[in-house]
Image (cartoon, grey):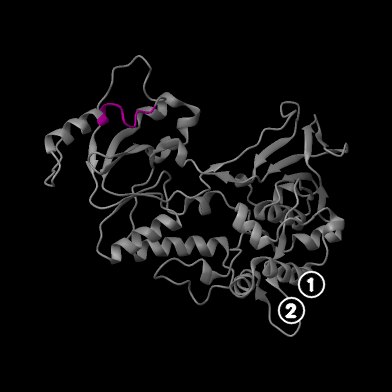
């Protein structure tokens, strides 16, 4: 391995350090038996920043660097840009915020797009963005370890690159997938982590899980409700995804129940005010927060939401008393749910609200209030978590 190094650092010392790093950086424990000898993996020097992740944030970073004439390298563990939007979202999904809040730098949404673009429109927009700024990630390349070499002022990032066909095989048949795997180390002055907070699906454990004979699936696998017509489905999780999956199921003729364990703020996506056109709740919230103390802005926002949605307490959807939606977001990071029709279905009886789960039974669920109910399927819409702590050392 030859590394051109013409800066003030001692090139020989750096070369020796890189040899040591290449010996054990990025070794996939699945692809190397414990007793096998240490292997040296090839290394690459990155001209400019190394960006991990080719979602909206990663592409926006790459585009901004490109227009400033700064070269960069972007790696993506899947085989396409915006893979989360393309692979793990349901068909009826729209942006929950007006498009002007969601557009990427230097590239507005087409005028023909509605205020809240559909999933397919947003996916098309991401593809157009990559083409417009000539963003060409190295696909099927996942970061497995990254650490900063303080003595040289550079990052060492181990990656595992696999052909598309081998990506899914790795979990099921480690030896076969490992045969098609390439491992190497990137060295870069700058590292940009743009993998987002939604890298891995969070699947909670339920007492009695092994007893339940029905189907349990994560919300990331849900596409639409056409296969659930007339079936009893429990949706666990009352964030935006859980609320909208329950709505979609009801629209397809399923019999959904929505499990709401905690108190939460539900706001309409738009406020319908007499004499005014519909206003984005987000924009109204921003306007209020700039002019009033946060607790006052919250009082007004909750009142305006009540005018649109009415009271939800009697249906089992209760607002937190200790803080309003804006204050709760600031203090805890909890985002209020933006309703797009679920509340109306709850009020009409098409969606049943149930309390938290005590345990699963053979045919359904025992709830914390002692009630039991049978379900054909349980959809777990409990969100995602970041995988960055698994590979980033700092």
| Residue at the image point whose x is 78% and y is 50% from the top | 254
**Quadrant in which the N terminus is drawn:** top left
Q: Hey, which quadrant is residue 338 in on the image?
A: bottom right
Where is residue 27 drawn, in percent x and y?
34, 28
Q: Residue furthest top?
A: 35
Q: Which residue in the structure is indicated by mark 2?
A: 273
Say which quadrant the C terminus sits in: top left
Expressed as whole percent of the image width and height from the top left, the position of residue 271 reads 71, 73
Question: Which of 176/287 is in front?
Answer: 287
Q: Please name whichever residue, 363 or 208, is drawn nearer the observer in this view of the structure.
A: 208
Q: Is mark 1 on a helix, strand or loop?
A: helix
The secondary structure type at the circle numbered 2 is: loop
Label 2 close to label 1 by CB (< 8 Å): yes
Instruction: Please determine whether, in this image, residue 61 is positioned above or below residue 19.
Output: below
Residue sitting farthest toward the bottom? 275
The front one of 202 and 295 is: 295
**Magenta span:** 21-28
Residue 307 is marked as 1
Q: Considering only vertical position in the picture, is 302 above or below 135? A: below
User: Which comes before the other along the chain, label 2 or label 1?
Assistant: 2
């Amino acid at each position: 391995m030859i590394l051109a190094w013409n800066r003030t650092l001692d090139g020989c010392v750096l070369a020796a350090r890189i040899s040591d790093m290449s010996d054990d950086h990025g070794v996939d424990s699945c692809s190397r038996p414990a007793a096998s000898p240490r292997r040296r993996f090839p290394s690459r020097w990155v001209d400019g920043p190394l960006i991990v992740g080719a979602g909206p944030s990663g592409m926006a970073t790459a585009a901004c660097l490109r227009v400033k004439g700064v070269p960069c390298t972007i790696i993506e563990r899947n085989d396409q840009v915006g893979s989360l939007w393309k692979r793990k979202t349901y068909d009826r999904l729209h942006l929950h915020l007006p498009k002007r809040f969601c557009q990427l730098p230097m590239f507005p949404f087409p005028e023909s797009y509605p205020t809240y673009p559909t999933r397919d429109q947003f996916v098309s927009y991401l593809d157009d963005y990559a083409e417009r700024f000539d963003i060409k990630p190295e696909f099927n390349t996942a970061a497995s370890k990254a650490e900063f070499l303080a003595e040289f002022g550079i990052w060492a990032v181990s990656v595992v690159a696999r052909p598309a066909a081998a990506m899914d095989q790795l979990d099921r048949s480690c030896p076969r997938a490992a045969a098609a795997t390439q491992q190497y180390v990137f060295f870069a002055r700058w590292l940009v982590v743009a993998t987002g907070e939604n890298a891995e699906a969070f699947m909670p454990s339920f007492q009695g899980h092994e007893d339940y004979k029905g189907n349990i699936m994560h919300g990331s696998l849900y596409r639409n409700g056409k296969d659930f017509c007339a079936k009893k489905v429990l949706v666990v999780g009352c964030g935006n995804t859980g609320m909208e999956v329950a709505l979609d199921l009801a629209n397809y003729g399923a019999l959904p129940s929505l499990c709401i364990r905690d108190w939460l703020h539900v706001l309409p996506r738009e406020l319908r005010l007499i004499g005014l056109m519909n206003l984005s709740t987000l924009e109204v919230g921003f306007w209020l927060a700039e002019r009033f103390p946060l607790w006052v802005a919250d009082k007004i926002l909750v009142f305006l939401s009540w005018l649109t949605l009415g009271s939800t307490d009697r249906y089992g959807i209760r607002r937190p008393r200790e803080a309003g939606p804006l204050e709760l977001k600031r203090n805890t990071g909890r985002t209020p749910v933006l309703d797009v029709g679920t509340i109306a279905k709850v009020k009409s009886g098409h969606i049943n609200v149930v309390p938290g789960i005590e345990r699963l039974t053979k045919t359904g669920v025992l709830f914390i209030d002692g009630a039991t109910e049978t379900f054909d399927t349980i959809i777990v819409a409990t969100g995602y978590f970041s995988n960055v702590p698994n590979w980033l050392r700092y």
